[in-house]
Image (cartoon, helix red, strand yellow):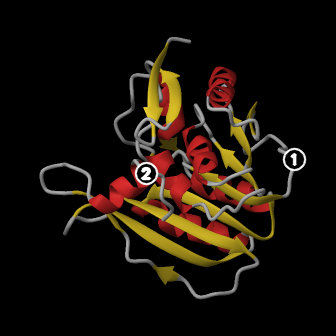
């Protein structure tokens, strides 16, 4: 695999990823900031790619145990190399599909940046990117249900997805016993509609649905807001 060497969290983490195909954006960093993990807990990430989300989470949470499940064996191996390069011996990455594999559990937290682009859009010419991003009918719900089954009682489930995927995810959360859902909109700029959102719930949670204030990512000139930089550069939690 041809890779590029880069960094995450303003240079705090070394991060190699494929030169072509699926490359990480800001989504896994935002997802990591939303997972309410505490020191010593065990997190499962589905579709972990080159490991960006678990790397960022391990940088914030001491003594974290993390399992990344990635269906591309080459990407899983690359993620394992990234964990080793940053000294995170509590992270492991396995080749497998969340809809088929039986990852050990239960886990304290589960998370994913699932395939969420709707079917029928313009396909990417790169097969790896297309497979990582395109959601077929019912796929968001299937991922949500598969993660819910691997949670311990009281454990959290966190997802990043498009605003259009919210109804399917909330329905799957309810079916999987995930309650107390909260939604955090990600505003691209002030007074712009949120295309992406963060969703979280608890196994057995009973609280009412909450709409959180949200995060504005960019100023009109395209620069990140101070609140976004706190997350993307300094690794602060949401």
In the image, which disc is placed on residue 234?
2
The crowding category of the residue bearing disc 1, from other C-alpha atoms within 10 Å (few below 14, some 14 to 19, many at least 20), is: few
**208 to 160, vertically: above or below:** below
The tally of labels here is: 2
- Residue 85 appears anywhere in the view: yes
Q: Would you identify the image quadrant in which residue 84 lies?
A: top right
Residue 139 locus on image (x, y percent): 60, 50
Label 1 element class: loop
Give 124 or 7, whichever is nearer the viewer. 7
Residue 81, image quadrant: top right
Q: Is residue 226 above or below residue 221?
A: below
Q: Are marks 1 and 2 in contact (CB under 8 Å)?
A: no
Which residue does the image show at 72% across and 53% down from the upper left? Answer: 43
Please tell me which residue lies in front, 137 or 12: 12
**Which residue is at 69% across, 66% downward?**
156
Measured from the top left, where is residue 123 in percent x and y? Answer: 39, 32
Using the numbered discs, state the Cα–Cα distance from disc 1 to disc 2 in whole angstroms.
32 Å
Residue 171: % across, % down: 61, 71
Q: Please tell me how crowded label 2 is: few (under 14), some (14-19), or many (20+) other residues with Cα within 10 Å.
A: some
Residue ID for mark 1: 104
Taking the spot 41% from the left edge, 63% from the top edge, the residue there is 163
Up the image or down, 196 lies above or below 90; here it is below
Q: Is residue 23 visible?
A: no
Tell me what residue is drawn at x 34 percent, y 57 percent: 228
């Amino acid at each position: 695999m041809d890779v590029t060497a880069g960094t995450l969290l303003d240079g705090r983490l070394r991060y190699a990823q494929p030169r072509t195909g699926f490359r990480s954006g800001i989504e896994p960093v935002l997802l990591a900031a939303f997972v309410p993990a505490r020191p010593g807990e065990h997190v499962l990430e589905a579709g972990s790619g080159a490991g960006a989300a678990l790397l960022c989470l391990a940088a914030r949470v001491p003594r974290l145990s993390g399992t990344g499940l990635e269906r591309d064996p080459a990407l899983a191996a690359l993620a394992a190399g990234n964990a080793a390069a940053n000294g995170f011996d509590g992270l492991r990455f396995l080749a497998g599909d969340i809809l088929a594999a039986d990852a050990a559990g239960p886990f304290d937290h589960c998370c994913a940046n699932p395939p969420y682009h709707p079917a029928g859009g313009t396909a990417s010419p790169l097969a790896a990117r297309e497979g990582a991003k395109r959601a077929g009918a019912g796929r968001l719900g299937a991922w949500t249900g598969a993660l819910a089954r691997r949670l311990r009682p009281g454990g959290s489930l966190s997802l990043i997805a498009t605003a259009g995927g919210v109804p399917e995810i909330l329905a799957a959360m309810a079916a999987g016993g995930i309650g107390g859902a909260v939604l955090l909109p990600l505003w691209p700029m002030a007074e712009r509609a949120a295309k992406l959102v963060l969703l979280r719930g608890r196994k057995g949670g009973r609280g009412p649905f909450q709409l959180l204030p949200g995060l504005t990512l960019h100023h009109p000139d395209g620069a990140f807001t101070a609140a976004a930089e706190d997350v993307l550069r300094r690794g602060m939690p949401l």
